[in-house]
Amino acid sequence: MATMIPQDLIKKSISDQKYKNSKHRRDLVYKYLDYYSGDNTDQYITSRFKAQSFQEIPPSCFNITRKLIDRMSRIYTLGATRNVNKTYNGLSYVKDFRFKHIEKMTRLLGSVATQITFKQHPIAHYDYNPVYYFDIFTDEADPFTPTAIIYPMTQGVDDVSYTEQVKWVYWDSEYYCIHDEEGILLEEYPNVYGVLPFVFTHREHQLSEFFVAGAYDIIKTNEQANILLTEMNLGMRFHLFGQYAIEGMYAEDNITRAGSDEIMVVPEGANVNILSPKANMDDAIKLLKTMVELTAQNNHLHVVLDESGTERPSSGIALKIKDLERFQDWQDDLDLWYKYEQDFYRIEKVIAQVNGFSLPENMGVDFVEPEYPETKQDMIAWDEYLLAHNMTTEADLMVKYNKDLTAEQAKSILKKNKEANNATKQQSPFAKLLNQTPTTA
């Protein structure tokens, strides 16, 4: 008869495996952040070089991750307009600024939790704090909707007096708690909002689990590029200096070698040669370009690593056709980020009500569409078409071309300009001649 496996053993095995998965995900998050910031990335490739000769050069730290991630993240780089009211505009004045970073981190890490907080200084406003590494608790009936979150508290690592151990923060719809590393409860407060004040953003739709994979291909390409560049640097060093080789000499014989101002003494009959490695740097550079370009193409990006063969400037239509796949990605992302905007707004309404502000039930969001170069004639014709069909106003066009103006300021400027132009026309001698009534003989 088969032996039954104890349930406690099964639970412990599952728990240990989930802990390993969580730790692996945490290590990946830190690695991705290092590559995006371009700091401390040599730690990921030094173990690849065991030979003593590689200690003679510093590891290469080439950063392509930031450039590709930033170019992929253009929902909030282009901007978004939220139609709520003036109260909300004042409360959310930092939202566009914060969301640019949140979108980039979502592209990089795959899944990000953003906490919505409320601050009173310098004025009453929302703030949005992204959490890069976190664990979640879910309901069995809905594993894609977290009911609670736990994450390590941000440490004051730059404070030389800070010596505390890592603390962990726990949030659910009822409580906000702080624990130490051993899980001992240190502080506990009621959650006055009654909802989990976090929104979870993902770079794409979830598949079989809550967390979505990050920019793994970009990180691995960056890592391989750093390894290749380190090898190329070492090869160039050996290629430039060469290696002395002596023929016709016993190994136990002593020789004297120094710099270029010294003489090397070798036994009679021995021949001294300088050998240089036959490294083909052009092939290595081509390999590096191919890796970067393929990774960029897989993410619907176009990069140019060699300016010598660049194309001449293209028209707006040609650029839009060339950028078609990326434009389609942008359209797909709109639906995803529109949903996230609504998720944020639902929590913002609750937080506003607790703090004495009232917001309308719904929020409208309009994302700015990518613009491609147009000729002046095309721009003028399109603007005149919009005005002729009452699809815009002169004030709106002025705001479009001068982002620093508000609608009220644009209307005031237009009014002053019209008054000045009318006054100039009335004072013109040609206008006086045109307005004269012809006399009959």
Image (cartoon, rainbow, N blue to C red):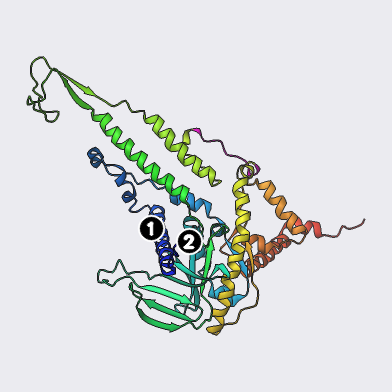
Q: Position of residue 121 (x, y in %)?
A: 44, 78
Give the residues in magenta. 309-317
Q: Amino acid type of disc 2?
A: His
Question: Residue 227 vs residue 91: left or right?
Answer: left
Question: Residue 360 vs residue 163: left or right?
Answer: right
Q: Position of residue 205 (x, y in %)?
A: 58, 58
Q: Could you classify mark 1 by the number of other residues whose Cα lies within 10 Å: few (under 14), some (14-19), or many (20 or more)? A: few
Q: Position of residue 187 (x, y in %)?
A: 37, 81
- Please report the residue visible at 39 percent of the width from the left and 33 percent of the height from the top: 284
| Rendered position, 162 above or below 312 | below
Which residue lies under the disc numbered 2? 101
Q: CA distance from mark 1 to mark 2?
A: 21 Å
| Number of the front mark, 1 or 2 | 1
Q: Which mark is residue 27?
A: 1
Q: Is residue 305 visible?
A: no
| Magenta residue check for 325 | no
Question: Residue 80 vs residue 19: left or right?
Answer: right
| Rendered position, 94 above or below 376 | below
